[in-house]
Amino acid sequence: MDLAQTYEIWRELMLDQEATWWQELFVRFYQAFLEADRWQQYLEGVGVTLVVTAMALAIGVVLGVLVAVVRTAHDQQRPGRPKNPVLGVLNLICKVYVTVIRGTPMMVQILIMGMVIFASSRNYTAVGALTLGINSGAYVAEIIRGGLMSLDIGQTEAGRSLGLTYIDTMRFIVVPQAFKAILPALGNEFIVLLKDTSLISIIGGQEMVYFAKNIVNRTFDALFPLVGAAVIYLILVMIFTWLQGKLERRLRQSDRR
Amino acid sequence: MIAVEHLSKSFGDNLVLDDLTEEIAEGEKVVIIGPSGSGKSTFLRCLNLLELPTAGTVTFDGEVITDPKVDIDKVRRKMGMVFQHFNLFPNMTIRKNITLASVRTKLMSQAEADDTATALLRRVGLEDKADAYPAQLSGGQKQRIAIVRALAMKPKLMLFDEPTSALDPEMVGEVLEVMKQLAEEGMTMVVVTHEMGFAREVGSRVLFMDGGHILEQNTPAEFFAHPKEQRTIDFLSKVL
């Protein structure tokens, strides 16, 4: 007797209200994942979730690095020499960007992007990924800036005193050390981003929660689709946490004594 | 070799260096002493423009390096600096610490720089540490490496900013020994220090700074035997 037949029989029992609790659970589980090969929809959703995360991450890191570099370069201008006016304007733009993005809820940002700015677009997933990337950029920028600022100024001075240029000092001395210092915070931001992709379903972005909600609408049963989605997120996050730990251990090789 | 004229430096309202004029000739070993807050570190850091003077000029090798048009990176390649807290790069091996600048500034190829590093490390007795990371070394070893790192650029002038102040007492000797050697080889040196023994033994001239001024200067023998200013006498009575 295969699963499909079992399901048919137990569903009849359930409709006659004669099924035991575990037979009923099996029927609900079957409807959520197996009937009409619905598990494929979760997989498709996971795929989209990962692609959206990757796109948002790429946008976020590029924006974050740009903003952090502008703001750090601006703040590290030497006292006593005239300030660079271009850098001043760029710094102001960056400050406004970080303030607005960090000061408004992600959900509102997604709704504004989906229903106002890109109201005519049908590519909801791309709009969602773009919004997440812009949002993430503000946080990544502050993480990177914190990392650059936290490094002992003596490191920069040692590099410059040897005749290295500002760029070379940044590239070989400051950034590698700052990167190691901010990796935990960056990993955390990545995990937040991965989970926040679920929010783009509000404007029709077709990631995992979108499909789970569709299945709820089909079967009038929310338990397994939602718990299933939660478990999948949890597994993804655990995989990435593990990978991050491996990377951190590798970068720590210069700390061994 | 290096001269300052009417050099002043203030941090906000705080005037740290007040109109200094001084010249250091090639081959001199100038030792700067004075109480904390007297401006001696700031003076040293003005020489390679780690601090930008508020007023006045610094002339190195005939070039006015305080001119904003001067490429300061090029000038600094000829001036080595050793810091109180070593400031080795913890993310690199010792070899990389020593070779990075000379390779990046195209002074040497990687192979030449590696040879130079090996020779210099042998000189300070640390050739077995080339592939170690700074975190694996003691304070004295770190400071000797920091000196070697500066020497790898083949500088004409070496600046030392309290090179032994952060060391455990038993490690001071090994660092001073390296500096003494360097002095004997004829390197021009400017040393901010609290090591009066070193000043007496190695220095060719002692500057005493207080309140942003060079209050008194003399040969070490004269300076320690017959200090003139009351402030100098008070200071020496406390530290000797």
Image: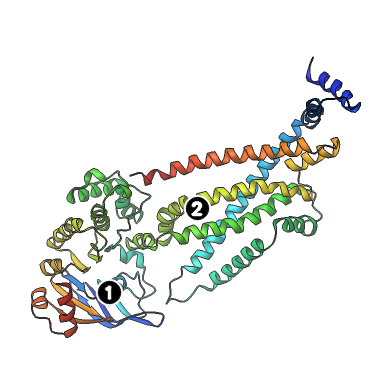
A14 displayed left or right of B109: right
Q: Residues within 10 Å of mark 1 (few under 14, many from 20)?
A: few
Residue B36: assigned label: 1
Chain containing mark 2:
A
Viewer-proximal residue, B182 or B193? B193
In this view, the residue farthest toward the top is: A1
Tell me the subunit letter for badge 1: B
Q: Are marks 2 and 1 in contact (CB under 8 Å)?
A: no
Q: Nearer the viewer, residue A86 or A124?
A: A124
Whether residue B166 is situated above or below residue B63 in the rendered picture: above
Q: Is residue A99 left or right of residue B179?
A: right
The residue sitting at 19% across, 83% down in the picture is B231
Which mark is in front, 2 or 1? 1
Q: Quadrant of residue A151 in the image? A: bottom left
Percent coordinates x, y for residue B178 in the rendering: 17, 57
Name the residue type under label 1.
Answer: Ser
Q: Residue at x 80, y 28 (%)?
A: A21
Q: Quadrant of the C terminus of chain A?
A: top left
SS class of the residue under badge 1?
loop
The image quadrant where one finds the N terminus of chain A is top right
Q: Are marks 2 and 1 on the same chain?
A: no
Residue at x 24% of width, y 50% of height = B116
The reply, left or right, for residue A185 in relation to residue B96 is: right
Q: Name the amino acid, label 2.
A: Ile
Vertical side of B214 occupied by B185: above or below: above
- Determine the CA span between mark 2 and mark 1: 36 Å
Circle 2 SS class: helix
Quick one: B205 or A123, which is closer to the camera? B205
Q: Which mark is residue A182?
A: 2
Residue A30, percent from left and from top: 79, 28
Q: What mark, if any, has residue A31 been given in the picture?
A: none
